[in-house]
Image (cartoon, grey):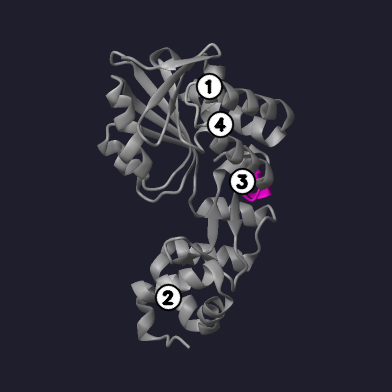
Amino acid sequence: MNQALIGYLFETKAIRVCPKDQPFWYTSGKIGPYYCNTHFLYGSEEKANAFLAQIDELKEDKLSCSKEFHRISKENYLSDAIYRGTIDALTNYVKEHFDIKEIAYVSGGERRDWFFSFLVAEFLGKPHITLFKDISAVLYENGESKPVENLNGARVLHVADLITTASSYERAWVPAIKSIGGNMLWSLVVVDRLQGGAEILKNLSVESHALVALNDQVFVKANQQGYIDGAQLKLVLDYMNDAEGSMKAFLKGHPEFLTDALNKGGKSAERAELLLQSNFYGVKDFFQAP
């Protein structure tokens, strides 16, 4: 377990744990005790969001954006200790666990993978394949970009921020590399959410690697280091042991949580309505909407 990286994740709020009585609303309409925004390892939430805004503006020009992403991330690497430590950890992991000569290219996908993939490619001395959501690709090497013609079976390492269910790999990244004649053999992420992504990658013939597996020990260590308190730790451990059951028990014991969300309006109300409509946690059996 990478102790320094766990510290970075909690210091930057890349992993954020809710107060004991206020679980987070997820986009799905479900609730849970923590978020994981690995790209905050860029140094902070504010810096990460600023880079995302730059990415959104620059990515429209596919042949010029890679150079800018590389330049911006390199400037931040030189000035931000947490980001530098993260990139160095990724690079050192590859050097320790791979035969670098076997890797012909490093790829990274739109958008958050790009926070990490360009500098790992640079420090490994490999060309970078910039992948877009529409399954197009650009080859970036020695400061210049060009369309990819045919990789002729070359082996590719994909570097990403995190993996959950590997849906982006299945939908876009693996097909994109195949479409240009490449062979994605490995994936390296900062965080594996342990939600089945590694198994999906195995089915895609991609070997899965991660600096941090987001298991209970990560949160135990965070508690020991003072990043979260005992009540927060219990909520997370209960959730990791039984996500559905723990959140159902929470809602039964805190009916005001749903009522407050419905009355609040905005995204909270929208997600509470979705929870009710979808009958997550069997909520209709024990909650009556006001």
Q: What residue is drawn where x is 42% and y is 75%? A: 248
Amino acid type for the residue under numbered disc 2: Lys
On-image quarter of the N terminus: top right
* First in residue order: circle 4 vs circle 2: 4
Mark sitting on residue 224: none
Above or below residue 229? Residue 139 is above
Q: Is residue 194 left or right of residue 37?
A: left
- Dominant secondary structure of the magenta stretch? helix
Instruction: Identify the secondary structure beneath mark 2.
Output: helix
In percent of width and height, residue 241 lies at 43, 63
Amino acid type for the residue under numbered disc 4: Leu
Q: Nearer the viewer, residue 66 or 129?
A: 66
Q: Disc 4, disc 1: CB below 8 Å?
A: yes
Q: Nearer the viewer, residue 23 or 63?
A: 63
Instruction: Identify the secondary structure beneath mark 3.
Output: helix
* Residue labelled with disc 3: 9
* First in residue order: circle 1 vs circle 2: 1
* First in residue order: circle 2 vs circle 3: 3
The residues tagged by marks 4 and 2 sit, at their Cα atoms, a distance apart of 43 Å
Instruction: Identify the secondary structure beneath mark 1.
Output: loop
* Residue labelled with disc 2: 248
* Residue labelled with disc 4: 58
Q: What residue is drawn where x is 29% and y is 37%? A: 202
In percent of width and height, residue 152 lies at 29, 13
Above or below residue 233? Residue 121 is above
Number of other residues with Cα within 10 Å of mark 3, as a class: few under 14, some 14 to 19, many 20 or more: many
Instruction: Identify the secondary structure beneath mark 4.
Output: helix
Q: Nearer the viewer, residue 252 or 234?
A: 252
The residues tagged by marks 2 and 3 sit, at their Cα atoms, a distance apart of 28 Å
* Residue labelled with disc 1: 64
